[in-house]
Amino acid sequence: MSALTVDVQQNGSVHELEEYDFSRLPDRPRALNLERQRSFDERSLTEMPLGLSPRPPSRSDNFSRAFEYLDSAFSPGKRSGFNTPRSQFGYGLTYEPHPMIAEAWDNIRRSLVYFRGQPVGTIAALDNSDEKLNYDQVFVRDFVPSALAFLMNGEPEVVKNFLLKTLRLQSWEKKIDRFHLGEGVMPASFKVLHDPIRNTETLIADFGETAIGRVAPVDSGFWWIILLRAYTKSTGDNSLAEKPECQKGMRLILSLCLSEGFDTFPTLLCADGCSMIDRRMGVYGYPIEIQALFFMALRCAMLLLKHDGPGKELIERIVKRLHALSYHMRSYFWLDLKQLNDIYRYKTEEYSHTAVNKFNIMPDSLPEWVFDFMPLHGGYFVGNVGPSNMDFRWFCLGNCVAILSSLATHEQSMAIMDLIESRWEELVGDMPLKVCYPAIENHEWRIVTGCDPKNTRWSYHNGGSWPVLLWLLTAACIKTGRPQIARRAIELAEMRLSKDSWPEYYDGKLGRYIGKQARKHQTWSTAGYLVAKMLLEDPSHLGMISIEEDKNLKPVLKRSSSWTF
Ligand code: GLC
């Protein structure tokens, strides 16, 4: 049996060598030899004031635990095997590269943006239509799947350039009208301006001051930290993260989010349109996407920040926030059949510490659809929780990141996958995957979106299907040991994506129609597909975008077994 060797070399030291035989497990990969080291990237909360040590899975552990463990292995500069005619690793016994892969690589390489001769990112869409809007820019969030593809293919340079260039942009003076934005804010996007007369190139960035609706890119800083950790983990090169300017950049991003205010919750209060859904869609307050990214970025920062000097005090604040945030999310954002039934029977107007219905959620605000949508087995993190407000909609990105960051407990992660399987028609349909479910319509659409013609029901952000989400689903599937779910979704995408010229999104209840105003050759649709394929082919890549659970963050939750009826 051939073995996949993950060569771990960082700081010139290899600490442990372990071998696991997955042969008795379902859907098994080949045996993995994991050379393991405790390093920069392996520090968990344990080595901080409150932590515990990550333990390697024993042979009796189940498949997904073993993949959690993959988090502590990595593959520096390892090519994924797509350049060879047949790959022998991954979940398939042998793997024939799909013809779309070569096309996808070609698209991604054509979308590269150069600044003074160096690649610094990928353009949002290679779309030749007149109305470019800002799709000719490098978006921070859009570049993430491209970056992962490059890292997985052993080409980290463009990722490093991107991280350094966006860091320089962060230090710009940011002003909207007469108002100065926080020092830590990262741009939503940037582009290279060529001056043919003077033959010069300059970067121009958008921090929300020119974006439609003047929306704040709260997610950009989080993605930046997550990508820095992915780069470090995949290359074994600590020197980038250790640079004083990178350390400072992280501190600035986190100081923005950890600053004290009037909050009564550990979640991060946001305006509408502050993330992937960058238009008014009723996601203001405490949207799941931002909370999950916040949690992931905090955990990555714990691994990247130096524990001396100015980082030390910040780390103490991060540890406290992680504890409070994970407790809050796992307790109050979690919805399953039992919790739904509890809310249905809630008393309201409770006062004092003994209140069960802490946020004063009115049972009458429960939407009709949620009763049918909730499967017997399964659950998910709801879209938003605030005073008398619970947004019951399903959001894909937040739930997948909750799995990858281990914000979701192991049981919750499994329950999310159960839900995706049971609600396949609704969440995947003909084209993976729904950005949120269900769509809002009629009067509600008028009120919530402000009559947005781009966000009509089952279109764009309002229940549209976004191929980019494939990589997140696939990563979550691998982490939970359910690669067959990802394979099914990828097969669906392969039936259409290339023929349809890699659209940005699809419309309709089942995602059957190319989106009304969708761009063609949208880079992150292509990169999302590519990363999904590479992850399936070589699951050890998962380590760069996944973090194992820290047992210290487990809430003392009595209803933790509520999804087993
Ligand atoms: C749309 C998406 C946003 C993305 C941008 C560029 O505005 O909503 O998430 O970053 O397009 O592709």
Image: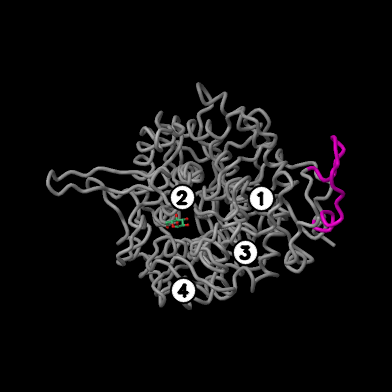
Which mark is drawn over residue 384? 1
Q: Whole-Å distance between the Cαs marked 3 and 2? A: 20 Å
Q: Earlier in the sequence, mark 4 or mark 2?
A: 2
Residue type indicated by callout 1: Asn
Q: Whole-Å distance between the Cαs marked 3 and 1? A: 15 Å
Closest to the observer, 317 or 279: 279
Closest to the observer, 233 or 245: 245
Which quarter of the figure is the N terminus placed in? bottom right
**Which of the two marks, 3 or 4, is nearer to us in this view?**
3
Residue type indicated by callout 3: Ile
Residue type indicated by callout 2: Gly
Q: Residue at x 31, y 49 (%)?
A: 191
Q: Residue at x 82, y 54 (%)?
A: 343
The vertical placement of 38 against 33, above or below, is above
Q: Which residue is mark 3?
A: 440
Q: Residue at x 34, y 53 (%)?
A: 137
Looking at the rendering, the stretch of residues picked out in magenta corresponds to 340-358
Q: Earlier in the sequence, mark 3 or mark 2?
A: 2
Q: Which residue is mark 4?
A: 514
The residue furthest top is 309
Q: What secondary structure is found at the residue carrying circle 3?
A: loop
Q: What secondary structure is found at the residue carrying circle 1?
A: strand
Q: Whole-Å distance between the Cαs marked 3 and 4? A: 19 Å
**Which of the two marks, 3 or 1, is nearer to us in this view?**
3
Residue type indicated by callout 4: Ile
Q: Which residue is mark 2?
A: 213
**Which of the two marks, 4 or 2, is nearer to us in this view?**
2
List x then y, in percent, for residue 326: 69, 42
Q: Earlier in the sequence, mark 3 or mark 4?
A: 3
